[in-house]
Image (cartoon, helix red, strand yellow):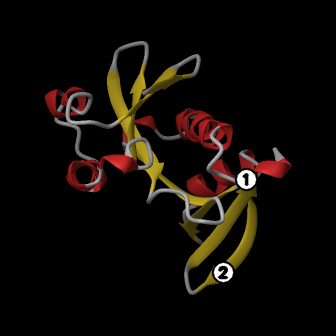
Amino acid sequence: MELETNRLKIISCTAETVQTAINQNYENGPEISNYLEQLNKDPSILNWGSWMVVRKSDDIVIGDLGFKEKPNENGVVEIGYGFLKDYWNNGYATEAVEVLIQWAFSTSKVEKVIADTLQDNYGSIRVLEKLGMKKVGHKEKVIDWELSKQSC
């Protein structure tokens, strides 16, 4: 599955689609490889894990984002994201996270998207604020966020 914005392609990770990232030596943590292992065991998680973010202008993988698991019985899903430092402060994270949240809400499975950030991760905090997510809790060094389908 592929989602698009004006500047980005957001591509659901599969063994086939992730070849783009492998060819570019994309390294941004273990999320994609962990997801592919889980997907191999449980195909029902397709699209409820890692997605690659590709800049359209040059087909470079600039980050990844996705859900930590399928929506639970209450329609809640947790989103996370990470971008290569060279691509920070360009609005890419906001653009990609927004389209993935919109996709999740367009399914009949999601009523609420949650996230968490470290309290000193000002870039991620700003992304979530721009998307209309609300602070709903704080524990140790982590801030909890949520956005309900009704508020969109």
Q: Residue 24: percent from the left, percent from the top?
A: 19, 29
Q: Secondary structure at mark 1?
A: helix
Q: Residue at the top extreme?
A: 57
Specify whether 106 is left or right of 11: right
Give left or right: position of 27 versus 80.
left
Residue at horizontal 70 percent and vertical 78 percent from the top: 137
Residue under circle 1?
Answer: 129
Q: Nearer the viewer, residue 89 or 57?
A: 57
Identified by mark 1, the residue type is: Glu
**Quarter of the figure with the N terminus:** top left
Q: Residue at x 39, y 26 (%)?
A: 54
The numbered disc on residue 138 is 2
- Where residue 75 appears, x then y in whole percent? 64, 59
Measured in 3D between alpha carbons, the distance from the residue under mark 1 to the one under mark 2, in whole angstroms, is 15 Å
Quadrant in which the C terminus is drawn: top right
Q: Are marks 1 and 2 in contact (CB under 8 Å)?
A: no
Residue at the spot 60% in from the left edge and 36% down from the top edge: 103
Q: Amino acid at mark 2?
A: His
